[in-house]
Image (cartoon, grey):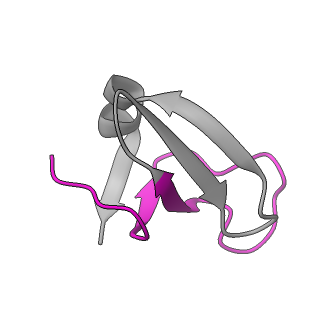
Amino acid sequence: MNIEIGEIIQLKKPHPCGKKDSDKWKVLRVGADFRLECMGCSHQVMMKRSLVEKSIKNHG
């Protein structure tokens, strides 16, 4: 899967913040791990590549 820095991805489950767009994440770092930023509350998380690729609902 080709995901680049700055892209917005939509995951299957929303972030627990519950704000609007909490299921959309901005990609800040790509590698073995991804750094994602919640578009609802700007919280940042690190996730393994395999988990992110499995959790993607909509890409791009």
Residue 22 percent across, percent down from the top left: 68, 62
Queried whether the magenta region covers residue 9, the answer comes back as yes
Query: Magenta-highlighted stretch: main secondary structure?
Result: loop
Residue 48 place in picture, x, y as percent: 44, 25
Span of residues in magenta? 1-28
The residue closer to the viewer here, 50 or 55, is: 50
In the rendered image, the quadrant that contains the C terminus is: bottom left
Please say whether residue 42 is one of the residues in the magenta stretch.
no
Q: Which residue is pictured at 29% across the width and 63% down the height?
A: 59
The image quarter in which residue 46 lies: top right
30 lies left or right of 16: left
Residue that appears at 34% across and 36% down:
31
Counting from the top left corner in percent of width and height, residue 53 is at 30, 37
Q: Determine the residue located farthest toward the left in the rendered image.
A: 1
Residue at point 40%, 27% (across, down): 51
What residue is shown at x 40% (from left), y 36% (from top)?
Answer: 52
